[in-house]
Image (cartoon, rainbow, N blue to C red):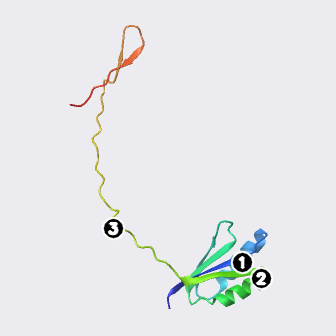
Amino acid sequence: MTKQKVVVKVTMTSEKKIRKALKIAVSISGVESASFAGSDKDQIAVTGEGIDSVELTTLLRKGVGYTELLSVGPVEEKKPNAAKETNPTVAPLYVDPYQYYYSSYGMPYYAYAYEI
């Protein structure tokens, strides 16, 4: 079997219901991880192998309240780009130890030495 991702929208009004919803989501067989998703953190994304999405939705409806099954699909695996691994060029750093000179007035003036 392949890994799949199930996203469920759950109405969670209290901290107690949030914990209960995550407990129910993790208790289903085949679940590897469960996390919050969405802008309001009202969705639970569950990943694993052989997850029964109908069973997950039914248990969440019984335990927490209103639940809506949003999507079921394969997990998208990210592949690293080898083209982005380029060596950056390093510019030499020129440090002048005599950068600050003081005049007889006590006011500092700056003299900069430029590399030729």
Crowdedness of circle 1 by 10 Å Cα count: few (<14), some, many (20+)?
A: many
Residue at the limit of the structure toward the top, as seen here: 104
In the rendered structure, the answer to whether residue 29 lies left or right of residue 64 reads left
Which amino acid is tagged 2? Answer: Gly
Residue 50 image position (x, y, % from top left):
57, 90
Q: Where is mark 2, residue-wise?
A: 63
As helix, strand or loop, the secondary structure at mark 1 comes to helix
Crowdedness of circle 2 by 10 Å Cα count: few (<14), some, many (20+)?
A: few
- Residue at point 67%, 90% (across, down): 54
Which amino acid is tagged 1? Answer: Ala
- Residue at point 66%, 84% (across, down): 27
- Residue at point 36%, 11% (across, down): 103
As helix, strand or loop, the secondary structure at mark 3 comes to loop
Residue 64 image position (x, y, % from top left):
77, 79
Asked whether the beta carbons under mark 2 and mark 3 sit within 8 Å of each other, the answer is: no
The disc at residue 21 is 1
Q: Where is mark 3, residue-wise?
A: 82
Count of numbered tags:
3
Q: How far apart are marks 2 and 3 (CA)?
A: 46 Å
Crowdedness of circle 3 by 10 Å Cα count: few (<14), some, many (20+)?
A: few
**Mark 2 or 3, which is nearer the eye?**
3
Residue 102 image position (x, y, % from top left):
37, 14
**Mark 1 or 3, which is nearer the eye?**
3
In the rendered structure, the answer to whether residue 55 lies left or right of residue 106 reads right
Q: In which quarter of the image is residue 81?
A: bottom left
